[in-house]
Image (spheres, rainbow, N blue to C red):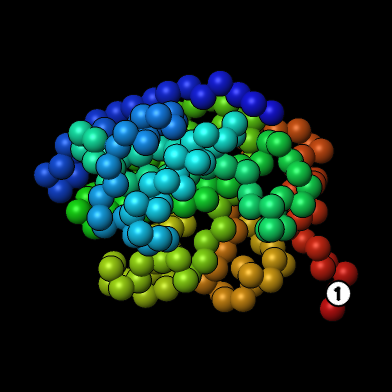
């Protein structure tokens, strides 16, 4: 399933920074941008920049950014689940994972993350997809935000709920390894029943083991 990536953008002000929220950004445009030094939750900014350009090059890859001029201060990624994760087992072409969301401390607490996700879902094509996010507490910037794991979990849930994502139960061992971890998903209006059943099958693989 390969869709045309319809581009959207909007302007907002965050902590005195005039931002453009836009995407999906093309690989060439993304490569020409700079990454803020505060975007280091997953790896150093230069390496994360390169990784995002590679995602943007994928047929299904979608990158939404928050930028001030050519400086990226936040981003959201969408792509097919990692082949090593259970969510790829059914090989669903209509399953996307919100793989990462990061906002620089310079513009944090200004709804930048919320606006990036909203821009991502302005594209009607998202109704053709099951979109999931797997939230693991060890990825959260607890130190930088001053939140504890439960406060951060509630904040992430509120963020994802703005585009209709809901908590879903699963017996995935990695998610079940800590009670703050969770799976959230949004099933698009045009997703077929076969894909929904396959997704449910991935959510629960040990339902008969007690």
Indicate the secondary structure of the residue bearing disc 1. loop
Residue carrying label 1:
209
Q: Looking at the image, can residue 80 be seen?
A: yes
List x then y, in percent, for residue 200.
Answer: 76, 52
In this view, the residue in front, 175 or 104, is 104
List x then y, in percent, for residue 8.
Answer: 39, 25
Crowding at mark 1 (Cα within 10 Å: few <14, some 14-19, many 20+)? few
- What residue is rendered at 64% in x and 26% in y? 2
In this view, the residue in front, 70 or 46, is 46
Residue situated furthest left in the rendering: 16
Q: In the visual, does 121 lie left or right of 89?
A: left
Q: Quadrant of residue 151?
A: bottom left
Q: Taking 182 as reference, is 47 above or below it?
A: above
Q: In the visual, does 71 lie left or right of 184?
A: left
Number of labelled discs? 1
In which quadrant of the rendered image does the C terminus lie?
A: bottom right
Q: Taking 171 as reference, is 111 above or below it?
A: above
Q: Taking 83 as reference, is 164 above or below it?
A: above
Residue situated furthest right in the rendering: 208
In which quadrant of the rendered image does the N terminus lie?
A: top right
- What residue is rendered at 68% in x and 36% in y? 94
- What residue is rendered at 63% in x and 49% in y? 81
- What residue is rendered at 64% in x and 52% in y? 82
Q: Quadrant of residue 75?
A: top left
List x then y, in percent, for residue 136.
Answer: 52, 66
In this view, the residue in front, 102 or 185, is 102
Q: Looking at the image, can residue 119 be seen?
A: no
């Amino acid at each position: 399933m390969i869709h045309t990536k319809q581009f959207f953008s909007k302007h907002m002000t965050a902590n005195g920074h005039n931002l453009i929220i836009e995407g999906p950004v093309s690989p060439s445009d993304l490569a020409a941008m700079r990454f803020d030094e505060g975007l280091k939750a997953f790896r150093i900014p230069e390496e994360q920049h390169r990784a995002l350009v590679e995602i943007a090059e994928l047929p299904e890859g979608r990158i939404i950014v928050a930028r001030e001029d050519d400086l990226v201060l936040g981003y959201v990624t969408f792509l097919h689940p990692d082949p090593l994760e259970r969510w790829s087992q059914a090989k669903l072409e209509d399953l996307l994972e919100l793989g990462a969301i990061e906002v620089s401390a310079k513009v944090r607490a200004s709804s930048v993350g919320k606006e990036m996700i909203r821009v991502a879902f302005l594209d009607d094509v998202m109704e053709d997809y099951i979109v999931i996010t797997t939230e693991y507490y060890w990825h959260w910037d607890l130190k930088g935000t001053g939140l504890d794991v439960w406060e951060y979990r509630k904040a992430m849930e509120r963020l994802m709920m703005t585009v209709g994502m809901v908590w879903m139960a699963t017996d995935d061992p990695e998610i079940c390894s800590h009670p703050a971890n969770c799976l959230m998903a949004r099933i698009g209006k045009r997703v077929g029943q076969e894909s929904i059943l396959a997704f449910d099958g991935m959510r629960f693989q040990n339902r008969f083991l007690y």
